[in-house]
Amino acid sequence: MIATILYLGVIIAGILITVFLLLLSVEVGVGLFFGKAPEVPSSTKLRNAVVSEIRARYPDAKTVIDIGSGWGGMTRRIACEFSGASVTGIELMPLSFGCSALAKLFAGPANAKFVIGDAIKFIKNSDGFDVGVCYCGTALMKDIPSLSDKFKLIISLDFPIPNVRPIKIIKLHNDGLGQHVMYVYKN
């Protein structure tokens, strides 16, 4: 009896892992097809650099949005560091959003929230944000200039905002993905 239960548990776990990997493959494929940057989780070093830059330039930020929040690591890190701020992560892809929302549900922090949908429409319909953080590909970055009045500070990782001059460019660490660069923009 116990062997049967264990056997069924292994089968169910295998099915769940297979479904997750299938959904992940479909999400990455669809994202690449529509010109979305592949989802690469932000490293601890990237998160630290963003938090340091926000702290240096806008330490009393009350509203922060992580555009293209992916798996939610950056959003949760910023929310932990700025506990008095409302930090929103917005993601278009359902699997990434689901994973971020689950992680937030089980691990917090309370001041983080995750939204699924089109970031550009979401920002256009908002009152604006103190800080916008972008770690997304060029397809989304091309629409950011039309929204610049919605932010007091914009930090972009690896992808510059087209036709907008940053106030600061910071070369970060070099890892297996190449040289990371932080672009800082301010109104």
Image (cartoon, rainbow, N blue to C red):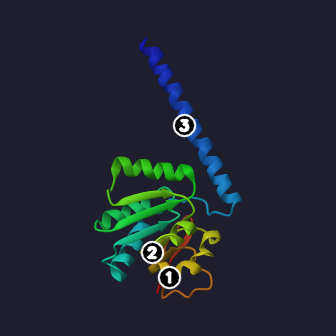
* 1, 126: nearer the viewer: 126
Q: Quadrant of the N terminus?
A: top left
The label number, if any, that marks residue 149 in the structure image: 1
Which element carries disc 1, helix, strand or loop?
Answer: helix
Instruction: Point out the tag, 1 or 2, that comes first from the N-terminus.
Output: 2
Report the residue marked by disc 3: 17
Q: Which residue does the image show at 51% across and 70% down from the upper left?
A: 123
Disc ID at residue 128: 2
> Which amino acid is tagged 3?
Ile
For the view shown, which residue lies furthest in the right direction? 33
* Structural distance between the alpha carbons of marks 1 and 2: 8 Å
Secondary structure type for disc 2: loop
Query: Residue 42, percent across and down?
Result: 48, 63
Crowd band around label 3 with a 10 angstrom C-alpha radius: few (<14), some (14–19), many (20+): few
- Under circle 3, the secondary element is helix
Assess whether mark 2 and mark 1 are in contact (beta carbons under 8 angstroms). yes
Image coordinates of residue 162 in percent, x first then y, are 62, 81
- Marks 3 and 1 sit apart, C-alpha to C-alpha, by 43 Å
Disc 2 vs disc 3: which is toward the camera? 2
